[in-house]
Amino acid sequence: MTTRLIFRLPSKYRSLSTHARSSTSIPATLHLKTGQSFSGYSFGTPRSIFGETVFSTSITSYTESMTDPSYRGQILVFTTPLIGNYGVPHNIAPRDSHDVGVVLESSGIQCAAVVVADVAEKFSHYTAIESLHTWCSRYNVPGLTGVDTRAITRLLRDQGTTLGRLAVGDDAALPPPKEDEYWDPSQENLVDQISTKEPYVLNPAGDVRIAVLDFGAKANILRALVRRGATVTVLPWNYDFNAIRNGFDGLFLTNGPGDPQQCWSAAHKLRVTLDEWQKPIFGICMGHQIIGMAAGLDAYRMTFGNRGHNQPVLALASSRSIRAGRVYVTSQNHQYALRLQEPFPEGWEPFFINCNDSSVEGIKSTSDSGRRVFGVQFHPESAGGPLDTMEVLYYSFVLPLRSHT
């Protein structure tokens, strides 16, 4: 018989939550498959959902995190106590040589739900047009506040990412779901759900032509390429790039949600590209994992992944602005990683390694392989996060494209 633990924030702390003081407060409880429950109050849309419970240590940029397609299907727990204090901006931008149609990382909220210690009903920022509560309501996303996110984070850190259910309203008083009732988003091809269905072009007047395989791209990846003068053609994740590759100067593989094992069809096509095409290739996050799988490396599920803006990585090799032996602070959001193995596949070498857990943070083709391929697990374009590795995107990918056109 499973013993369930129920956590409630002491009343003297619960009273600090602005939403808890609202006369319209609705009870809500987060149930974890491992037997713990956390009770608080609902904000956003008052509906119950299942998802994969993960935590992020990022201090700012909650709007960018919540619109990141890599969080699809996940119940996002913020370790920062106060969330929502600077509101939500208007999320429409032009499509031109400077921008890609949105201000945030996609056109809407991508995570399944959000959990915070204290949600701010009042907000203050010159670009804000609505509160976190209103924004979540517009996108039918439930939220939970008035809970001890520190306790949730410690559980997830120790036992690993855990399936969960956010029960809202009358559902909060019901018994927790049975183990076989929890939904596991990693069993679905989330990339196929979020990737573009049709190709489209950004900044058609650019001086280099980049094809982008969209596994769930953050808008700032496309924005970073466009602002560096590239014409960007965004393709579905499983598009046969080899049929059109001669029309491009480089190939870019984006981030995306879920298990990379669901994307083997893309890895098989990329293997052909690596064997037959000598132009630069760059991958971020999921794209990095697809490159590694095509090269012969294994991708595995980490215990709790890395999500936040403060992950240190050690450079193992030098490449233009990157210096071997130097530590860079990076922005990350991933559950899976490439396995460090010895020997590494012929023609490849590790580029970065995580200083905390020794996971592979980057790979690159060797100088004698004849290829110009780079992959990084972190986000050098970082929205939000530090800009320590921003130059790796330009000097290792965009600049070589321009010098060979």
Image (cartoon, grey):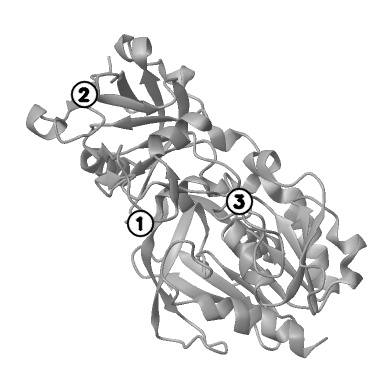
Could you tell me residue 141's position as x and y percent?
A: 48, 30
What amino acid is labelled 2 in the image? Leu
Quick one: 117 or 20, which is closer to the camera? 20
Asked if disc 1 and disc 2 are in contact, CB closer than 8 Å, the reply is no
User: As drawn, is 122 to the left or to the right of 315?
Assistant: left
Nearest to N terminus: mark 3 or mark 2:
2
Foreground: disc 3 or disc 2:
3
Q: Amino acid at mark 1?
A: Thr
Q: Which residue is tagged 3?
A: 92
Q: CA distance from mark 1 to mark 2?
A: 31 Å
Residue holding disc 2:
5
- Asked whether the residues under the numbered discs 1 and 3 touch, taking CB atoms below 8 Å apart as contact, a structural biologist would say no
Type of amino acid under label 3: Ile
Q: Position of residue 4 (x, y in %)?
A: 24, 20
Q: CA distance from mark 3 to mark 2?
A: 44 Å
Q: Which residue is mark 1?
A: 60
Please say whether residue 162 is visible from this viewpoint.
no
Looking at the rendered structure, the secondary structure element under dot 2 is strand
Image height of 176 relative to 367, above or below: above
Which of the two marks, 1 or 2, is nearer to us in this view? 1
Q: Residue at x 32, y 56 (%)?
A: 59
Tell me whether circle 3 and circle 2 mark residues in contact (CB < 8 Å).
Answer: no
Are there few (<14), some (14-19), or many (20+) residues within 10 Å of tag 3? some
- Mark pair 1, 3: CA separation: 21 Å
Q: Is residue 343 left or right of residue 35?
A: right
Q: Earlier in the sequence, mark 1 or mark 2?
A: 2
* Residue located 60% across and 51% down the image: 92
Quadrant location of the N terminus in the rendered image = top left
Q: Which numbered dot is residue 73?
A: none
The C terminus, quarter of image: bottom right
For residue 237, say whether it is visible. Answer: yes
Instruction: State the image quarter where residue 366 is shown.
Output: bottom right
